[in-house]
Image (cartoon, rainbow, N blue to C red):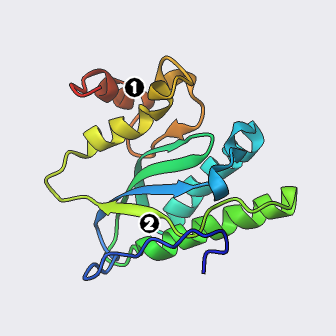
Amino acid sequence: MGGMGTKRPPRIKGISYVGASAYFLTICAVNRSRPFVEPGCASAVCEQFLRTASAYRFAVDAYCLMPDHFHALVEGLADNSDFRRFVAMFKQRTSFEHRRATGLILWQEGYFERVLRTEEPRLAVAAYIVNNPIRAGLCKSIEQYPFTGSNRYTLNELAEAVQFRPDR
């Protein structure tokens, strides 16, 4: 179905993707293009992500929009929080706006997710996500990068988590 030779990653069998689970999400721009170097596009995508997460009852532990991909750690807040519907709606809304504004396709087909085990430390995964622009050399501290954040932790809490990561 992916017209560009990419195959949609399969969802994990035996997982409902509904309820209070946590997910590490990665979505790539089509053909690893770099649409998010344009600040207006990047801001609109981040705002839509937070709005859609709230509407579908997901907490956002961390998100980071890189020039060519998006990472997030989200957790369902209700028994009916539906991860697949949430991600589909986010991609649909941002794709529509981007196509309307530029005439271009925004996202590659599908997305990648990892379901976190309950014992996995969420703040460590969040720190990994927000540390992306530092590792990529886009900034020296997460406070300098405008397209990262959380609706659960402050930027200070995330920055402290990055500083205390032994595997940095």
Residue 162 horizontal/vertical position (percent)? 33, 27
- For mark 1, give the secondary structure: helix
- For mark 2, give the secondary structure: loop
Residue ID at (30%, 43%): 125
Distance of label 1 from label 2 (alpha carbons):
24 Å
Q: Is residue 69 left or right of residue 17?
A: right
Lower sequence index among marks 1 and 2: 2
Give the residue at the far top of this rendering.
140
* Quadrant holding the C terminus: top left
Give the residue at the far left of this rendering.
119
Above or below — where is 54 with respect to 14? above
Residue ID at (52%, 37%): 148
What is the three-letter code of the residue carrying label 1? Asn
Residue 68 horizontal/vertical position (percent)? 61, 45
**Rendered image quadrant of residue 58:** bottom left
Above or below — where is 103 with respect to 47? below
What is the three-letter code of the residue carrying label 2? Arg
Residue ID at (49%, 17%): 140
List the residue tagged with mark 1. 156
Residue 57's disc number: 2
